[in-house]
Amino acid sequence: MAKSPNWTREELIVAFNLYLKLPFGQMHKSNAKVKELAAILGRRTPDSVAMRLTNFASVDPYHQNRGVKGMSGGYSQVKPIWDEFINNQEELIFESERILAEYKHETLEEAYPEIEFDLKDLKGEMKTRLVKTRVNQNVFRQMILKTYESRCAISGIDLPELLVAGHIVPWAENEHERLNPENGICLSNLYDRAYEKGLICIDTDYKLLLSKQLKGHTTKEFYQQFFGRFERHLILLPKSYQPRKEFLEYRLKQFEL
């Protein structure tokens, strides 16, 4: 039997793209998304794609701490891709989406018809920057929903249509941590909006805090139903990539109890 050719950088980046979006327990050859990626790549089997996903798990610090190990040859191939991600998350994620679209013979706009790109009056670098931002935000959402098993960390709502990948340190305030899953929390639209407006916060013990402004509405029916009942309760924490405490502290400094 002929030996399979070495994986190219483009193939590895596309496999990493799937790794970011797929729960660890689903990284097997029978998974529909693994089969789909193998078909897209053309010269890879579902078994070889699943093996590469496991290789990426073996260089991921979270899974390393759990004792997940991959074959040494695979480790050496995927480690440079992981390092690129750590050093420049935005560029690598965007590149992975661009390459994936090319494999599918699509533009990024065609690959993401649900995204409002607002490109009508934009050209050149401004257009590229907006597409990159929209695509990366979409990937971040997929990563956070995967991490939180598509459940709101406060209410437990599990309808993806109602869920948002909220940033702890806002997108505009820390470019390097924009796509770090430890900087994200899965929230329903209501709680994401309340978090962004400083009406609620999460402390370093992962408990929900309510602002003085919000507590001014304690006599109203909505207060207890949507907020009061969750005060000082522990949020629903994911198994991996729990909110980093230094990010929570950053947000707490701007919060008024």
Image (cartoon, grey):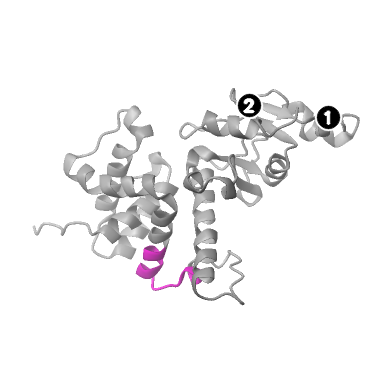
Q: Is residue 38 left or right of residue 243?
A: left
| Residue type beneath disc 1 | Lys
For this rendering, which residue is in front, 29 or 184? 184
C-alpha distance separating marks 1 and 2 = 17 Å
Q: Does the magenta stretch mainly form a helix, a strand or a loop?
A: helix
Residue position marked by numbered label 1 in the rendering: 215
Residue 165: percent from left, percent from top: 58, 46
- In the picture of the structure, the residue carrying the numbered disc 2 is 203
Residue segment shown in magenta: 98-110
Quadrant (top left/top right/bottom left/bottom right) for the C terminus: top right
Residue at the image position 35 percent from the left and 51 percent from the top: 16
Placement of 205 over or under 39, stated as above or below: above
Element at badge 2?
A: loop
Q: Quadrant of residue 41?
A: bottom left
Classify the position of the N terminus by image quarter. bottom left
Q: Residues within 10 Å of mark 1 (few under 14, many from 20)?
A: some
Viewer-proximal residue, 3 or 90? 90
Q: Horizontal and vertical percent for residue 150?
A: 56, 43
